[in-house]
Amino acid sequence: MSGTILSRRIAILENAVSNGELELKPELESLKAVAQGLIDKSVSLEQLLKLGDDNFEAVVKELAEKKEIALLMNLSRAELGKVKRKIIKKAIHQLKSNGVQIPEEIVERKITIPSRVLKEWIMASPVMLMSGAQLIYYYASGTMGSNFMIIHLNSREGIKETKIFHLNESYARDMISDARISSEIPVPAIEISKEHFFWRIQRAESVTISQEPKAELHSFLEKFLVKIPEAIEAEHPVFKEIDVEKVKSISVYGFKIDQLLEHSFFRRWEFNKEIIDACEEELKEVALSPIQISESLKMERIEKVFEKYAEEGVMKSLEEIRFCLMENAYLLKLRGEDEFAELALKLAISLENKNESLEFFKKILLRSFPDAWKVLGKKGEGLIIPGI
């Protein structure tokens, strides 16, 4: 036999088998084969890994006693179960404690011990229409310190940028209160659940083309010990928070849409700048045309200009805007502003209808075009777009 530890273990198994415990016979034969393999240096890693935990422990103790460092190194690198991993780590630790030089590669794998999270919160800013920009904040404080992460998302482009800071909570909240999507647009933040955080991140990843921002984000998340589930639901979580049947009965146009667009979440919404500039040029052509036409014909042409660019806006931005509306509806619901949440969701649903979406886009286009009346002159001040 190869040594006293294995000899004793084999003797115990032989005695058990001779007393009728025949189910132990396969283990006995496997252990005998390993013992012989250790003698003639033919034992394989596969043979060792197939041993039961008790037999594996006996072999590891034998290897440690004989200082079979190379074989211990191979075992330490193998994919082991929890019990076997503990056995090999204990053996290596004892060897090191006894002054045995262990090659660097066999030293236990460095494991980052998670700091116990004492406090964490996640906040999201309302999405800004057209750019679809949104900031997500993740704050965690634990026994190893505090970390604050800011993720800049875009509904069209996905993950834009990720930054991480080591800040205490008061500084983190100060940074949120001063946050700007651009130099002029302050963005309030609302606390969200970790589930919605996961949903929002995964949706952003799904439209992010470059692998670099994805890798950067996941690297930061690992520092926070945050693991995002592999699959998420396709439907926005707002549909679980708001009664859709009730929402469908709401009339959103007229006075109510004005109320919604005056809300702080929506007041800064801006139409696509390229569309505004192009619309302005055509309005100037109509208003400043040297050709004498009747006032009614001029208004008809103006109406067609607005319809043209509203339709272009539908084609370019509809899905993006619907997502922004759903996200804002969700955040408004979290803030307890149920009426505005329902209005925003109703609008998001109604935009599935092209005619209704065109009316909405004309409304936004006019609001985003404050100089329209100057271009059209005094008579344009009375311009009324049907349906708005």
Image: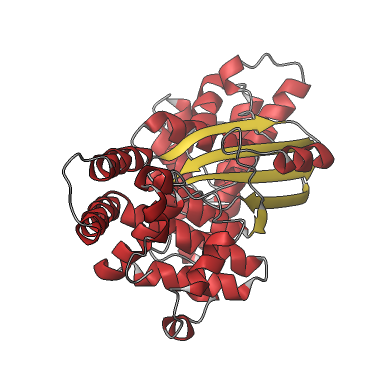
Q: Position of residue 363 (x, y in %)?
A: 40, 60
Q: Position of residue 93 (x, y in %)?
A: 71, 28
Specify how the rendered protein is coloured: secondary structure
Q: Quadrant of residue 185 in the image?
A: top right
Q: Position of residue 174 (x, y in %)?
A: 78, 39
Q: Quadrant of residue 145 in the image?
A: top right
Q: Position of residue 44 (x, y in %)?
A: 40, 32
Front residue of 161 and 182: 182
Quadrant of the frame with the C terminus: bottom left
Tell me if 160 is positioned left or right of 335 in this view.
left
Establish if 101 lies above or below 91: above
Residue 7 visible:
no
Tell me if 220 is positioned left or right of 377 in this view.
right
Total numbered labels: 0
Establish if 368 lies above or below 284: below
Q: Residue at x 61, y 48 (%)?
A: 83
Establish if 269 lies above or below 35: below
Q: Residue at x 72, y 38 (%)?
A: 178
Front residue of 280 and 233: 280
Front residue of 293 and 300: 293
Residue 76 visible:
yes
